[in-house]
Image (tube, rainbow, N blue to C red):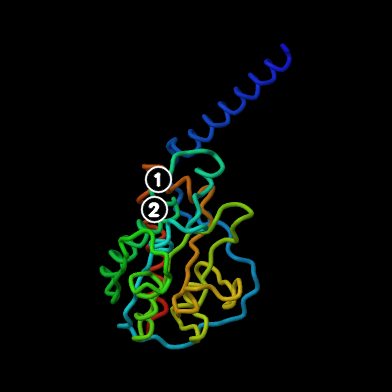
Amino acid sequence: MGNKVSNTLKLIVFFLIFYAFSQLYYTRNFNFIEDFELIIGEASNIPATWVGSKDVDKNIPILILAGHADSQGLAGAGTPGEAVDRFGLNPMHPEISDELFWNLKLQESIVKLGKKKGLNIRSYDPGIRNIDDPNDPRTNWSVGRRFAKRGGYAIEIHFDAYGKYGIGSGLIPPFSDPPNKIDESIARTFGRFPVSFRGGLGAPRRQIRILEIGKLEGLLEKNLRNLKTRQKTINLLANEIVQAFLNGII
């Protein structure tokens, strides 16, 4: 009986130490290292042969969507991230996934910076976090599809799942429209997924690009969660995306 109690206490102490270490890892102060490739981690290694060669007008309208902004009540609607799911830290917001929390922050920063750089850029947020019908006119997919049909460039921002559940950074181009030079520019920065990834996802089938920033884990997530490095990290990511837009435009 005594051995069982002793082993239980050891186990409790071990988990308390592990939890305390996890909290410290994600909240202590780190010096910000402005190394984009180091922060976003590995890119997708799934073979993708597409090349974006279609010219893009310099005034092309650009729409930035935050992935999972309208589907928080559905299964798989955004990764909780390694910090929450593996290490037991509190979510950034109690009512949404950590991925959506960062998607929204990055969406705002991309649009703000893009406008400063002279891009014809805007964002859309449905405001309603649970829309069951993907074809509801208020969803990301519906708004993005209409935008793309009018000749605009619609892209949905995501962070990939951590560990073995995710693949890494990269762009998934539209399913039927030929990839353009913005697509190519973003892919050279973040990597590329095949057009038919997982049989063709809902957004690309509606001519909405998907950009996976990187796995929500490790250095990337740590820098996002740390108050000292959060805005610097978001700004770094936004700058790389906006610069990719500019590089792809004539």
* Quadrant assignment, res 94: top left
- Of residue 61 and residue 99, the one placed in the foreground of this image is 99
- Of residue 155 and residue 125, the one placed in the foreground of this image is 125
Above or below, 180 against 30 in this view is below
Q: What amino acid is labelled 2 in the image? A: Phe
Between the residue at mark 2 and the residue at mark 1, the CA separation in whole angstroms equals: 7 Å
**Contact (Cβ within 8 Å) of mark 2 with mark 1:** yes
117 displayed left or right of 167: left
- Residue depicted at 47% across the width and 77% down the height: 183
Count neighbours of disc 2 (C-alpha within 10 A) and say few if under 14, some if 14 to 19, many if 20 or more. Answer: many
The location of residue 139, given as percent across then percent down, is: 37, 69
Q: Secondary structure at mark 1?
A: loop
Q: Quadrant of the C terminus?
A: bottom left
- Residue depicted at 31% across the width and 68% down the height: 124
Q: Which residue is mark 1?
A: 92
Q: Quadrant of the N terminus?
A: top right
173 displayed left or right of 45: left
Q: What amino acid is labelled 1 in the image? A: Met
* Quadrant assignment, res 126: bottom left
Count neighbours of disc 1 (C-alpha within 10 A) and say few if under 14, some if 14 to 19, many if 20 or more. Answer: some
- Residue depicted at 33% across the width and 82% down the height: 60
Q: Secondary structure at mark 2?
A: helix
Q: Which residue is mark 2?
A: 101
The location of residue 14, given as percent across then percent down, is: 62, 26
The location of residue 102, given as percent across then percent down, is: 40, 54
- Residue depicted at 47% across the width and 45% down the height: 222
The location of residue 245, given as percent across then percent down, is: 39, 74
